[in-house]
Amino acid sequence: MLLSVVIPVYNSETTLAPLVDKLQTALAGYSFEVILVNDGSRDRSEQVGEELANRYTNVVFVALRKNFGEFNAVLCGLNHTSGDFAVVIDDDFQNPPEEILKLVQAAQQGNYDVVYSYYASKQHHWFRNLGSDLTNALATYLLKKPKDLYLSSFKLIRREVIDEIRKYTGPYPYIDGLIFRVTRNVGTIEVVHQKRQEGQSNYTLNKLISLFINVLVCYSPLPLRLFTILGLLLFGLGIMAMIGLAITALSGFPVAGWAIILAALFLLTGFLSVFLGVMSEYLGKLFMMQSGLPPYVVKKVVTQSKSGA
């Protein structure tokens, strides 16, 4: 069995080398490879990654041309794996490398396609915890994931699922969304979670908003359909109001002008909302199919056997 360890790298020049060194010790009994993907870091992470790839025969370093985002970097890493399983782990040492073995054992014992980690006590900043909770709640309704499943970034994915995820070529990959498009055979295992050793989290408000919008818009037509349903409700209210006004007028009772205007607005707004909702369904799908934007652009790949773009 070959195990692949995918590490998205961003501004981690101080933790990257110790993490890779620790992996060499923690996984000494396994055949494994380490895929480092530098996501446009602004520090010396690229130089450190190259040095590690030249030092270890089982380390592959991939540099992206700019910062594409964590999920894009993970997708790039998965595209460079060859293992039977791939474990995605952050570069900040909050997940001890030894805990990888727990995910491997859980996958083998339960024959799971994917194993997510969860923590008895999360050591993230409160803002990142808030973002994770919001994203998990959204994914529960849009992706139909189990409510008690925590979508941790520290997870294991089986080769068959990786091969399906790699087929995605759009600009907005959401790894958990792609996973739940492929399989529901998912397990969980509790692991240790440590405080961040160096620096500060790169999880910002902009990234939280971007992730929230990507999950909401790119992985479910639900928002469009909600507006379509709202339009149908308004249209129905407008029709009922017009019928009521007509009955009132035929009965000889006076009809207020504002009531007619309000009913007409319901009809018009409802019709337009339904029309825009249907058009948005078509345009949204066409855009996603025809955008042609790549999920990432590779600058270079460095290993002991090769080096190039």
Image (spheres, rainbow, N blue to C red):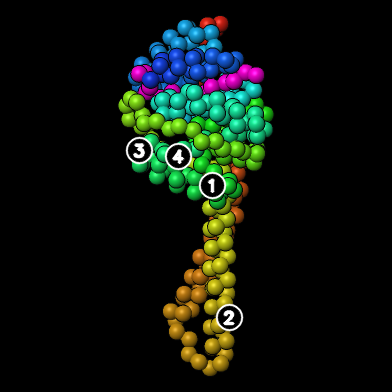
Q: Which marked residue is nearer to the observer: mark 1 or mark 3?
A: 1
Secondary structure under badge 2?
helix
Kind of residue sitting beneath label 4 = Ala
- For residue 166, what is the image quadrant? top right
Residue highlighted by disc 3:
125
CA distance separating discs 2 and 1: 48 Å
Q: Which segment is the magenta one?
A: 1-14
Q: Which residue is mark 4?
A: 120
Tell me the amino acid under the disc marked 3: His
Q: Select label 4 or label 1 by which is in front.
A: 4
Q: Earlier in the sequence, mark 1 or mark 3?
A: 3
Camera-side residue of 140 and 19: 19
| Label 3 crowd bin: few (<14), some (14–19), many (20+), radius 10 Å | few
Of the numbered discs 4 and 1, the one sitting upstream in the chain is 4
Q: x, y (%) of residue 115?
A: 58, 34
Residue that carries the numbered disc 2 in the rendered image: 243
Tell me, yes or no, whether the highlighted magenta stretch contains residue 9: yes
